[in-house]
């Protein structure tokens, strides 16, 4: 329910005042499994054809990117849905001009909710090449802050041995509306022999477990997994049993009422899967979504408040992973997916959230340490770091403070639970086998923080 202040703010006179204060009505973002709204331009800067070859696999019609050659700025005949720039092979600072020359016409010519995607080398040699690699990240972040009307830009580092099939799930995700609130980010895709072709229902008949599933982001994660074909196991505390039952009935999944801080939580999840789906059943995707906040300034944080957040948000995951990875019936399958929820608070810190930031930064550390350990089993480990997402919890923040949080990102608005869920769906996809050890911020590119 909106407050009187919110009703005033969003009234016609309120919108006039908001505009004068530099707070325009946020752009309506294109979300869901919808592709680019216009043609996709492709550019190859240093001879690599990976970008164009991957887009071709996706069946997207392409045109050649225009280049600013120093004369009158060329204009596209119609607004672009996306620009895909293959910048792999750039080694010298002078070569960055090539990127500027293809970006400039595209930035001006993008459709609302358009996309810019830059591909770069994961590993380079030499000081100048490293400087160029990092410069690409600076360009990516800056362009993301300059784009308007819901357009985004992202940078994908690609290993030298990657093939188009390794990149299809990533480019598909970035070109679609599923990545609406992912902006100014960079992550790495590596070669993987286990990456199958992309599919409309990539999780068909696979088991996905979601903790904290009764409402909010967790319910949306379960919904997206079910949409993509999964048999979902929705886990939440007994107090959320009614909502949990309603969700699982809607999705055709199963419910497990469980406090994840219980010492045997992992064993009970595996036992539930084995009893419901058979002794040979294994979990494809384990999504650690459950979490709590107990916010106070550090000077006012006692041991109990500190411990409760660390226990739910981090320690419970470690224990559950140990049980689910030991090969027992109903545990995590080889070639499975572990996905956790981190937070921008864990990356950049946030006043009054030392315990929460510690737990979510710990999730980032868990992901980066566990991913190489499980690579031999084909299991990927990743995390999503949400920024300001519109939920029941954020609705309790005082209006003025909430409006500031909403607006202080490149897209000028808060995200929705579906934005987090779609990114997790990308991680769960079997075609994302080359994506592991990565943390993607779903924050519209917060203007403060890493």
Image (spheres, helix red, strand yellow):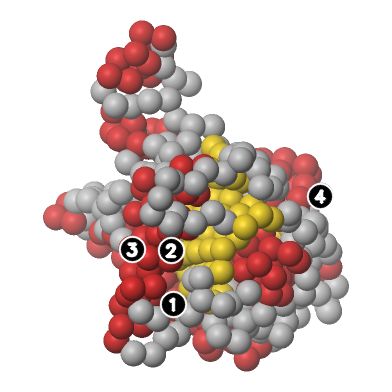
Do the CB atoms of the residues marked 1 and 3 lie less than 8 Å apart? no
174 shown above or below 261: above
Answer whether labels 4 and 3 touch (C-beta < 8 Å).
no
Q: Earlier in the sequence, mark 4 or mark 2?
A: 2
Q: Can you give x and y, in whole percent of width and height, for residue 412 in the image?
A: 39, 37
Report if the CB atoms under discs 4 and 2 are less than 8 Å apart.
no
Is label 1 in a helix, a strand or a loop? loop
Q: Earlier in the sequence, mark 4 or mark 3?
A: 3
Mark drawn on residue 90: 1
Q: Nearer the viewer, mark 4 or mark 1?
A: 1
Residue tagged 3? 138
Residue 314: where, in percent of width, then height? 43, 68
Q: Position of residue 94 (x, y in %)?
A: 33, 73
- The quarter of the displayed image where residue 260 is located: bottom right
Numbered circle sitting on residue 114: none
Please, what secondary structure does the residue beneath circle 4 have? loop
In the picture shown, does residue 27 fall above or below 77?
A: above
Is disc 2 surrounded by few (<14), some (14 to 19) or many (20+) residues within 10 Å? many
Q: Residue at x 37, y 16 (%)?
A: 15
The residue depicted at 51 percent of the width and 76 percent of the height is 46
Q: Is residue 373 above or below residue 71?
A: below
User: Label 4, label 2: how many angstroms apart (C-alpha)?
Assistant: 48 Å
Q: Tag 2, which secondary structure? A: helix
Please give the residue where the numbered disc 4 appears in the rendered image. 252
Is any part of residue 196 visible from this angle?
Answer: yes
Would you call the spot at circle 1 few (<14 residues within 10 Å), some (14-19), or many (20 or more)?
many
Which numbered marker is on residue 99?
2
- Mark 2 vs 1, N-terminal side: 1
């Amino acid at each position: 329910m909106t407050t009187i202040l919110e009703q005033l703010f969003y009234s016609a006179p309120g919108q006039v005042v908001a505009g004068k204060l530099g707070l325009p009505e946020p752009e309506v973002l294109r979300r869901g499994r919808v592709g680019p709204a216009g043609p996709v331009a492709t550019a190859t800067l240093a001879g690599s054809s990976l970008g164009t070859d991957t887009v071709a696999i996706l069946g997207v019609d392409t045109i050649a990117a225009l280049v600013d050659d120093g004369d009158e700025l060329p204009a596209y005949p119609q607004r672009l849905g996306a620009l895909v720039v293959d910048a792999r092979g750039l080694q010298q600072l002078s070569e960055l001009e090539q990127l500027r020359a293809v970006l400039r016409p595209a930035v001006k010519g993008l459709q609302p909710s358009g996309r810019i995607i830059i591909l770069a080398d994961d590993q380079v040699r030499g000081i100048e090449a490293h400087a160029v690699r990092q410069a690409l990240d600076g360009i990516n972040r800056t362009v993301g802050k300059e784009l308007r009307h819901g357009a985004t830009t992202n940078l994908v580092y690609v290993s030298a041995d990657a093939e188009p099939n390794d990149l299809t799930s990533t480019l598909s995700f970035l070109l679609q509306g599923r990545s609406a609130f992912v902006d100014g980010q960079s992550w790495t895709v590596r070669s993987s022999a286990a990456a199958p072709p992309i599919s409309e229902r990539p999780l068909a008949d696979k088991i996905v477990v979601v903790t904290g599933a009764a409402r909010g982001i967790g319910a949306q994660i379960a919904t997206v997994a079910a949409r993509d074909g999964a048999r979902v196991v929705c886990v939440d505390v007994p107090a959320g049993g009614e909502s949990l039952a309603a969700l699982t009935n809607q999705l055709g999944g199963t419910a497990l009422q469980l406090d994840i801080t219980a010492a045997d939580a992992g064993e009970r999840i595996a036992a539930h899967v084995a009893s419901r789906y058979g002794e040979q059943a294994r979990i494809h995707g384990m999504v650690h979504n459950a979490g709590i906040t107990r916010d106070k300034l550090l000077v006012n944080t006692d041991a109990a408040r500190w411990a409760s957040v660390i226990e739910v948000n981090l320690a419970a995951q470690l224990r559950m992973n140990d049980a689910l990875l030991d090969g027992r019936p109903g545990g995590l399958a080889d070639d499975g997916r572990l996905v956790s929820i981190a937070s921008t608070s864990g990356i950049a810190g946030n006043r009054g959230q030392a315990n929460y930031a510690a737990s979510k930064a710990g999730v980032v550390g868990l992901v980066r340490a566990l991913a190489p350990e499980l690579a031999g089993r084909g299991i990927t480990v990743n995390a999503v770091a949400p920024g300001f997402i519109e939920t029941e919890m954020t609705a309790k923040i005082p209006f003025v403070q909430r409006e500031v949080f909403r607006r202080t990102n490149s897209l000028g608005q808060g995200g929705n639970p579906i934005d987090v869920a779609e990114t997790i769906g990308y991680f769960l996809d079997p075609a994302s086998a080359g994506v592991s050890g990565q943390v993607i911020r779903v924050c519209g590119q917060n203007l403060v923080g890493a």
